[in-house]
Every structure is written in C-alpha cells, then in structure tokens.
Amino acid sequence: MKTPGKEQFPPAGVDLSQPSVARVYDYFLGGDANWEIDRQFADKLLEQFPIMRLIARSNRLFLHRLVRHLTKLGIRQFVDLGSGVPTMGHAHEVADQVAPGEVRVAYVDHDPVAVAHSRSLLRQYGDEDRHTAIHADLRDPAGLWEKIAATGVIDLDRPVGLLMIAVLHIRQLPTPDSPAADDLGPRVVDTYRGLLARGSYLGISHVTGEGVPDGTAEMLARIKAMYDSVGSPVLWRTKQEIQDLFGDFRMIEPGLVWTPQWHPEEATVTDETPQLDQANQSIALAGAAVKE
C-alpha cells in the first residue's frame, strides 16, 4: 500500500502526551504515521538498541510470508488484530500477489491513528467491498466480532486467517467489564479460538526472553522498563507459554520457530531481508495452527 505524505490530523481524541506502541513500530519500519512523541521514544530505543529496527522488519516479513502461505492453502479471508498503521505492505497487498481480487481483509486496531490512516489509504488504493478498517478493542472479542460481521466484508461462518502479530506481548490490561487480572492474553486468545470457524488458521508472533543470544536478556529487561514507563506495559512469554496460546489447534510446519525461520521460501524479491546474524536475534517466536 502506498503511503502519501503525512496527513494533517491526528483524529479527535488521540492522546499525543505518550508514545503509542503502534506508531513507534511504524517508525521502526520507516513509516510516517507517527508524531514527535513517538519518534523521540523510538530514537531513545534505537540509540541504545539499534537492532530494534531489524527486529521490527523481521516480524513484518513474517506477516508477509504467513499471508502468502495461508493464501496458497486456500484462505480467502483475513482478520488482522492489532494491525497497526499501513507500513511496509499490508495483508491484502500480499494476498493479492497470490490470489488477485479474491481475498478479503478486516484490519482491526485500538489506536485511532492506525485506523484513520488505514481507512484513508483503503479509500485511495483498496476495494471497499473487500477491505475494511475497524476501531475496536482486542480485549472484547464478542464486541469486536460483531463489528467485523457488521461490515459485511468478512463471512465469519467460513474459514478465516486470524493474525495476531506482535500484539500479545503488549499486556492486555483489564477493561471496566473484565475481571481484575493483570494479563488477559491467554483468556482472550482462547475466546477467539472458540469464535473461529473450522478450517480457520491462527497466526501469532510474540517476543520471548527464552533462547535469545547471550546478553539479550538485559536488553529485553531495559526495553520492558522503557515501555512500562510510558504507560505501554509489555511482557515476554516463554516458548511454552506462547505455544499454549494455540490451544488444541494443530500446528503447521515448521511449528513454533524464530520469525526468520518460518517458511523462508515464501519470501519474494520485493522483501527486504533483515541482516540478522542469528535467527534468535529476532527475539520473537512465530507460528500458525489450524482449527480442525
């Protein structure tokens, strides 16, 4: 998706007193849907950990390969939860490389800036019959599912590729209607698994502190402290905890691996390859599973 020059907003009600995880990620990927507060925070991270940009790109390219692979497996609908801002290729662009004009995509984010940019670009370069952007809260699966159904773009009674890419390590704090729990991630993902039709796929990438290169644990602790300090708390799960998010869905090959290791053959000449010396420098595990 092309990105025009920075538009003259944020939308009404957007808080620019604190950096946004979505907009910081956009900045790492070279996008322009970010503000000075986001760039200042991102630059502090990059000053200490220049590898953050390569980590972000490695994760984004996993999304590309995942969408290509699932489209080849016959998936023609995707729901991208925590889709972020339109940077470095959105899911429908990648899917159209495999099945032009056939794939429907619903982008969902809680950040009004991400949703506003997505809607603006979809109006210019998308197809309103096949693409939609929804402002909704990941922590409310039933309400979010209702909003998706109301668009008429996605048929939720048919198989869907549900994408939860680099979103579950952002701590899902309670909503006013939810129990007082510190991390709602596993319970929320369990609910989404139940909502999916048979034949659907769940794709996840998630930061972990387990199995990373020597010295990386200290880096992850400092990154966590920085995000926590600006009101965007994060958490790093173990490999087993990430595996458990797939529940009883059947993992597809190659299982849960570092992001660069997941179906590298699905990369195309248009993909920019991150220059990571070791796969575990990506600090994120990735996988996909099918509901049988």
Image (cartoon, rainbow, N blue to C red):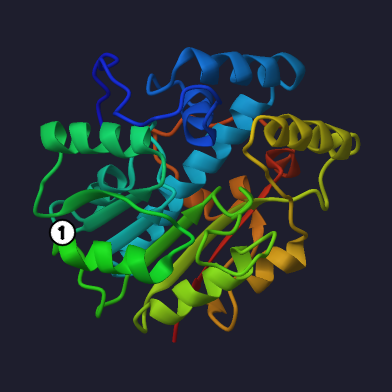
- For label 1, the SS is loop
Identify the residue at image location x=48%, y=26%: 29
Quarter of the image with the C terminus is bottom left
The picture places residue 160, in percent across and down from the top left corner, at 32, 69
- Say which residue label 1 marks: 102
Quarter of the image with the N terminus is top left
Pick the front one: 285 or 23: 23
Locate residue 114 relative to residue 43 in the image: left or right.
left
Pick the front one: 41 or 281: 41
Q: Is residue 89 visible?
A: no
Identify the residue at image location x=60%, y=25%: 53
Q: Is residue 79 visible?
A: yes
* Amino acid type at mark 1: Glu
Locate residue 39 relative to residue 155 in the image: left or right.
right
* Farthest-out residue, front: 176
The answer to whether residue 145 is above or below residue 61 is below
Locate residue 226 relative to residue 171 in the image: left or right.
right
The picture places residue 182, in percent across and down from the top left corner, at 70, 59
Identify the residue at image location x=53%, y=59%: 175
Number of labels in the image equals 1
